[in-house]
Amino acid sequence: MAGERHARLLSKVATYGLQGPLIQQLCTGALDLLAVNGAAFILMSDRETGALAAVAGTRTPRLEDLQFTLGEGPCLQSFESGRPVIEPDLLRDARARWPVFVDAAAELGARAVFALPLQIGAARLGVLYLFREEPGLLSGEGFADAFAVADVGTWLLLGMQAGAVPGELGEGLDGSWTYRAVVHQAAGMIGARLEIPLVEALTRLRALAFAAERTIYQIAADVVERRIEVVR
């Protein structure tokens, strides 16, 4: 049954006549297939890196960036737990889980968010991130199709990575998020200077960005250019 659903899903996406890599076509097609306003395939690792492998919806990149900047949100929770995270109404009861993310996401127009793991067995690649402008769950068929989109996307991403040099991203997976490299460079500098783990260094960057009401990318650039010195 799963194979039939996957085939039907890809056949439906093909009728849209979309351009670009198949992973991007699948992501864009998901907006109509799942009746959502935004979708993204996000590559993640245990070091909290996040990379948009494919994105659809004009506000989706900003909504995903919120989680990377704040260090909280459905994608991080789904990746860490290996389980789907489903929140049909952000403004009703999600603040206990994501006290800062909720209001910031609502300001960008998100009222319902869904994150599904991209994984095969114990191997975790990232998450499929979906959001809607109106509160409410996906339909029963919508959830089944969402899991099928996640499954197909996982295999597509594995295929794109198959021929890559160990430690490097595969062709087509190395362009749209390179601006994030400055954040990890800054975290590395802070970690080396203060002799603290990279995760703690990234937390310090986030705190600085929040306190200064600036983006984490702006703060990171200042650290790399030595316009800001982070001390204990």
Image (cartoon, helix red, strand yellow):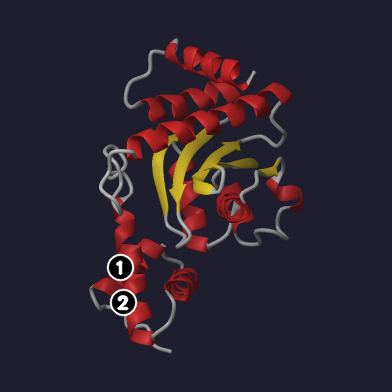
Question: What element does badge 1 sit on?
Answer: helix
**Above-or-below relation of 223 to 64:** below
In the rendered structure, which amino acid carries the disc numbered 1?
A: Gln
Residue visible at 59% across and 25% down in the picture: 34
Residue 33: x and y, percent?
56, 21
Marks 2 and 1: CB-CB under 8 Å?
yes
Q: Is residue 27 left or right of residue 98?
A: left
Q: Amino acid at mark 2?
A: Met
Give me the C-alpha separation between circle 2 and circle 1.
Answer: 6 Å
Question: Which type of secondary structure does the marked residue at label 2 adopt?
Answer: helix
- Identify which residue is drawn at 48% across, 17% down: 10
Towards the viewer: 213 or 156 = 156
Dividing the picture into quarters, in which one does residue 52 lie?
top left
Q: Are there few (<14), some (14-19), or many (20+) residues within 10 Å of tag 1? A: some
Query: Badge 1 is on which residue?
Result: 185
- Compared with residue 120, is residue 44 higher up or lower down, i.e. above or below? below
Task: Identify the mark at residue 97; answer none if there is no mark.
Answer: none
